[in-house]
Image (cartoon, rainbow, N blue to C red):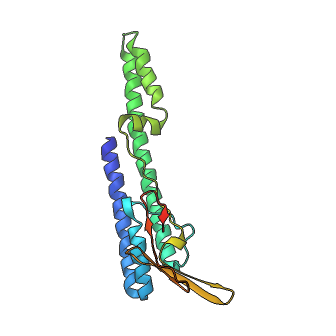
Amino acid sequence: MIQDARKKRDTGYSDNVEALLFQFASHAHTGKKEDAVFMENLKRMLGGNRIPSTDGFRGLTDEVVKNFALAQSKEKAIEDAHRNELTHIRDAYVARLKGAAADTADAELKPRLLAQAERASDLDEWVQSLAPEANEATQSFPASFLGKWSERNYGHDEHWIAHPGGKLEVVGHDWNVTWIILENGTLEI
């Protein structure tokens, strides 16, 4: 039952990401060339079918911010529905354990059944003990590591473009560097 609930949750995550990708594709076709590059970079962040945080992003259009906010709220609703489903599964399990404890005449079995019911009081620990799941953190990347950024400093224009292939172009500086975002989210230049 827990595995079925996870499949349902994961399908919801996947559908949510696909809807966001569709919105990105629509925006990339109607926007400027730089917007298309930026959208491609954003798409690569959606690994694991989770919506990343947009904290610290620079250069996001109002439409993209709105799309992210909607996708994040949908993801939260999916998570809440999944937790409610797990709670119902656990509550049924505890009720059956307590019922079995009440029906048993075995003096050694009764306390063991009640102890199992008590251990299920912490939903997260109970689920992990029955069906461990690897924790995947939602990725969050600062704006300065993705897409295009421009800033005016003391009358000088500086900007950089992070290209999908890993090349970092810094205009106004003579930098010849490449970048990669490691699996743990660290930027390596």
Q: Looking at this view, name the residue that lies furthest to the right.
A: 154
Residue nearer the viewer, 79 or 33: 33
Residue nearer the viewer, 130 or 42: 42
Q: Position of residue 177 (x, y in %)?
A: 46, 75
Q: Is 99 drawn above or below residue 56 in the view shown?
A: above
Q: Is 6 drawn above or below residue 110 in the view shown?
A: below
Locate the N terminus by quadrant.
Answer: top left
- What residue lies at 36% left-to-right and 10% top-to-bottom? 106
- What residue lies at 36% left-to-right and 35% top-to-bottom? 130
- What residue lies at 34% left-to-right and 68% top-to-bottom? 18
- What residue lies at 33% left-to-right and 52% top-to-bottom? 8
Q: Position of residue 139 (x, y in %)?
A: 47, 60
Q: Is 95 drawn above or below residue 21 in the view shown?
A: above
Q: Position of residue 111 (x, y in %)?
A: 44, 16
Q: Position of residue 186 (x, y in %)?
A: 49, 61
| Res. 48 image quadrant | bottom left
Count the labels in the image.
0
Residue nearer the viewer, 145 or 27: 145
Q: Is residue 20 visible?
A: no
| Res. 75 image quadrant | bottom left
Q: Is residue 34 left or right of residue 149?
A: left
Q: Is residue 84 visible?
A: yes
